[in-house]
């Protein structure tokens, strides 16, 4: 099985919001769509889900045009939504029914996920006993935002989907719940699901996948395997921490300072050779080196660089058009 | 197209279940049920207060046109009393005085003749008569084989010598007179008393070229028919307004809570809207069915006379056109009309993203609904006074008004079959058009977030809707 998006174009009037997007998942795993706000991630997802028509391109499942109504797709939307006044159990059963899950099977999965996501007391509140404290409500409007998000994730998982689309899954979660969500995503990865995840939290994405596309204003600015992309950049980030002041040595070596923290320097080098020379200088000067780390740029750094470059190029193009 | 509706049944079931469980629905239902129980005693009070009215109040207007001038300078009223079949003697023999009309009119040239011959022969003679005369026939109204009320029929020649309004006024006068007289009748059996207590049917008829009574030309409706058609219109208005408001609210809720994002991964927008429209309309119909049931129970419990409050209001004569085919036709018209309004309400709901904007979005819809209702009410008044005319036919065919008017008109037998069929076909065509219109723009609207999409923009969206790919 494979999932593929080919040359997808979607526009609103004259504004192109997704411009020639292509990517594919040849085997189960996670694919990431990255981009700042308004980059076209959610629109791309809505098109993949069949909510929006697209102008041209193809969305293929196993090499054939994908019919959303024939596929079992779980979706966690960026803008979370639950009926505020209806019982949570009723809603989950309804969502499962719409995905053609038999009621018994749906109940089994709801029990599993409500236990796994620590929502039992809300989804299956005990019947009120006279004289005892009133049990917690089973309505969405009386849940915290984090718990509502968990119920929403349950709705996406209740059909045990073959394709799982998660739009900003961890946004707004506290660290404990974020870890819980991450463990659920890992669990789904182990079940060999095809997962498409969008985010602008780079650290989240790096934890799950190496395959990604970075979008900026609808256009693809970077695409491929993260490890290979990083290799292309080389090891140019140098982090140095010493007990004594090394600012003179940095100046002597002519290294640009990217960031200066109270006890360490983040420096930019041209490669391993320049880093080695700088280490030799520190040893010669008898600097007490506590940390010397040479690494590839982070996804965050690549993202910022690519998006900034794309925006600058667009600005220049617009300027040229005006002239 | 099949895919477009897949899942509509599931939406229907869930929406119906949640609506029936909702506090708003339960509270509205309870209030309506209380009103249903109270309405019968209130009607009874009104009926008992009205029974003692002085007939002279009505008589002052007898034989006068709308400006109050006497419009007939001389008139002969031939009275045929055929009530002896039920009572053994006629009402006239019991002492009912037909001549009082002369004193109240204040017109010496009105003469009243109590006839004993055949009314059929008199009707034949009426056409060729050059005199200004009418025939007043008092007989038994009937439902099937059982006489259930008295009927006063005023016949006039189809020559225009005696205006229809004069015939109606004569009939109305005698009904009022009889209401005052009936309490003086004693020694009646239960069956006879039931007939006497029932509301008197009033019919104004023509005679055709051969002197035969021409039923086709008698297109006016009496008070009881008016009451039934009006009640029907009112019930339909409630179904449409309550159902449509709930439809729009439900669709806006889906959008404002963003649940629609999840729903649309499983079903198409049209399945969503069709499921909701059907569920909400059924919920409203259920509410009204409950109301009507309680009205009937209340009628049994609270009616104190020989005839119940509703029997007084809707005489058996009124129900004679209520047959399986007319009921079916009325039901079809009702369903098609309610669907049309329901789909339009769904569009209004989809045109906004926030609940706060719902009232504004529904304002044009409410005005449209009320226009349909008022056209229907006016047509009923026209039928009461003048009978069928071009305006009434327009009301029967115009989809906005036929939704409310046609079912009632069918039940009282005041619409011809070809008009009814044509009206249903028009409703069907309009429904198909509305459906295609909604299908084309609903998807864009339901995915829209932001300011309200105004109706004039709907058309732009319809024209601009392009065919593209879809997963």
Image: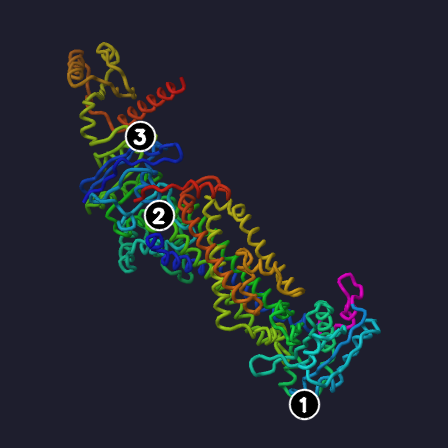
Q: Which residues are magenta?
A: B50-71
For the question of whether residue B31 can be seen, the reply is no
Label 1, secondary structure: give it: loop
Q: Quadrant location of the C terminus of chain B? A: top left
Between circles 3 and 2, the one closer to the viewer is 3
Pinpoint the chain carrying mark 2.
B
The residue that label 3 is drawn on is A219
Secondary structure character of the magenta stretch overall: loop
Determine the secondary structure under disc 3.
strand
Number of other residues with Cα within 10 Å of mark 3, as a class: few under 14, some 14 to 19, many 20 or more = many
SS for tag 2? helix
| Image coordinates for residue A185, horizontal then vertical, percent | 25, 43
Mark 1: give few (<14), some (14-19) or many (20+) Cα within 10 Å: few
Asked whether residue B338 is drawn in magenta, I would say no
Residue at image position (27%, 41%) is A179
Front-most of A304 and B206? B206
Point out which mark residue B336 bears: none
Q: Chain of mark 1?
A: B
- How far apart are the two marked residues, 3 and 1, measured between alpha carbons? 98 Å
Q: Residue at x 25, y 11 (%)?
A: A251
Circle nearer the viewer, 3 or 1 = 1
Residue with the mark numbered 1: B88
Q: Is residue B374 above or below residue B301?
A: above
Q: State the residue at coordinates (25%, 20%).
A: A266
Residue B248's spot in the image, x, y percent? 48, 51
Label 3 – label 2 distance at C-alpha: 26 Å
Q: Position of residue B415 (x, y in %)?
A: 56, 66
The chain ID associated with circle 3 is A
B172 relative position to A205: left or right: right
What residue is pinned by disc 2? B262
Q: Position of residue A57 (x, y in %)?
A: 28, 38
Q: In the rendered view, how is the structure colored?
A: rainbow
């Amino acid at each position: 099985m494979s999932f593929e998006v080919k040359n997808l174009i979607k526009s609103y009037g004259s504004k192109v919001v997704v411009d020639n997007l292509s990517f594919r998942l040849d085997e189960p795993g996670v694919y990431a769509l990255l981009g700042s706000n308004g980059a076209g991630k959610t629109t791309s997802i809505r098109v993949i889900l069949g909510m929006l028509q697209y102008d041209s391109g193809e969305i293929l499942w196993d090499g054939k045009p994908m019919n959303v109504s024939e596929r079992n797709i779980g979706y966690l939307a960026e803008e979370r939504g639950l009926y505020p006044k209806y019982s949570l159990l009723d809603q989950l059963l309804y969502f499962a029914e719409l995905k053609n899950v038999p009621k018994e099977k749906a109940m089994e999965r709801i029990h599993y996920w409500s236990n796994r996501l620590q929502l039992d007391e809300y989804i299956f509140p005990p019947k009120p006993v006279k004289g005892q404290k009133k049990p917690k409500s089973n309505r969405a409007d009386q849940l915290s935002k984090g718990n509502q998000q968990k119920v929403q994730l349950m709705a996406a998982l209740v059909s045990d989907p073959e394709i799982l689309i998660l739009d900003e899954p961890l946004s707004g979660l506290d660290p404990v719940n974020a870890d819980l969500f991450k463990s659920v995503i890992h669990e789904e990865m182990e079940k060999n699901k095809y997962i498409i995840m969008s985010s602008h939290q780079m650290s989240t994405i790096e934890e799950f996948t190496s395959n990604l596309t970075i979008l900026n204003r609808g256009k693809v600015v970077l695409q491929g395997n993260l490890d290979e992309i990083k290799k292309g950049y080389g090891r140019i980030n140098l982090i140095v921490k010493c007990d004594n002041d090394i600012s003179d040595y940095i100046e002597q070596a002519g290294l640009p300072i990217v960031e200066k923290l109270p006890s360490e320097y983040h420096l930019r080098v041209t490669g391993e050779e320049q880093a080695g020379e700088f280490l030799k200088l520190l040893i010669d000067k008898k600097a007490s080196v506590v940390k010397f780390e040479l690494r590839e740029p982070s996804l965050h750094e690549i993202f910022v660089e690519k998006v900034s470059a794309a925006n600058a190029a667009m600005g220049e193009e617009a300027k040229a058009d005006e002239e | 197209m099949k895919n477009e509706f897949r899942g509509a049944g599931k939406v229907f079931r869930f929406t119906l279940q949640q609506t029936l469980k909702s506090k708003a629905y339960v509270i509205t239902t309870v209030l309506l049920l209380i009103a249903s129980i109270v309405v019968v005693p209130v009607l009874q009070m009104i009926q008992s207060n009205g029974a003692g009215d002085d007939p002279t109040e009505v008589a002052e207007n007898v034989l006068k046109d709308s400006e109050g001038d006497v419009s007939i300078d001389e008139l002969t009223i031939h009275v045929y009393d055929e009530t002896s079949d039920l009572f053994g003697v006629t009402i006239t023999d019991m002492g009912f005085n037909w001549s009082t009309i002369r004193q109240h009119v204040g017109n010496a040239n009105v003469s009243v003749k109590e006839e004993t011959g055949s009314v059929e022969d008199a009707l034949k003679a009426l056409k060729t008569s050059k005199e200004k005369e009418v025939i007043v026939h008092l007989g038994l109204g009937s439902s099937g084989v059982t006489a259930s009320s008295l009927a006063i029929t005023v016949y006039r020649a189809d020559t225009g010598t005696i205006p229809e309004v004069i015939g109606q006024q004569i009939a109305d006068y005698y009904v009022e007179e009889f209401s005052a007289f009936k309490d003086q009748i004693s020694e009646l059996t239960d069956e006879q008393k039931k007939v006497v207590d029932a509301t008197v049917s009033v019919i104004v008829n023509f005679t055709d070229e051969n002197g035969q009574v021409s039923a086709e030309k008698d297109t006016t409706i009496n008070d009881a028919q008016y009451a039934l058609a009006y009640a029907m219109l009112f019930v339909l208005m409630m179904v449409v307004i309550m159902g449509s408001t709930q439809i729009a609210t439900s669709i806006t809720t889906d959008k404002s809570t963003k649940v629609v994002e999840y729903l649309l991964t499983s079903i198409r927008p049209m399945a969503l809207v069709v499921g909701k429209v059907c569920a909400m309309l059924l919920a409203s119909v259920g509410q009204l069915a409950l109301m009507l049931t309680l009205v009937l129970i209340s009628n049994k419990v609270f009616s104190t006379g020989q005839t119940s409050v509703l029997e007084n209001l809707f005489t058996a004569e009124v129900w004679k056109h209520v047959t399986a085919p007319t009921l079916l036709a009325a039901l079809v018209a009702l369903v098609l009309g309610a669907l049309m309004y329901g789909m339009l309400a769904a569009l209004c709901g989809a045109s906004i993203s926030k609940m706060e904007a719902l009232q504004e979005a529904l304002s044009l819809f409410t005005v449209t609904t009320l226009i349909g209702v008022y056209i229907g009410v006016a047509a009923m008044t026209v039928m009461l006074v003048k009978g069928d005319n071009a305006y009434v036919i327009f009301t029967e065919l115009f989809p906005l008004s036929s939704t409310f008017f046609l079912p009632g008109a069918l039940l009282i037998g005041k619409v011809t079959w070809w008009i009814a069929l044509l009206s249903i076909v028009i409703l069907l065509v309009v429904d198909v058009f509305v459906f295609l219109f909604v299908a084309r723009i609903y998807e864009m609207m339901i995915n829209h977030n932001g300011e309200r999409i105004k109706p004039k923009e709907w058309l732009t969206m319809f024209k601009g809707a392009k065919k593209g790919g879809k997963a």
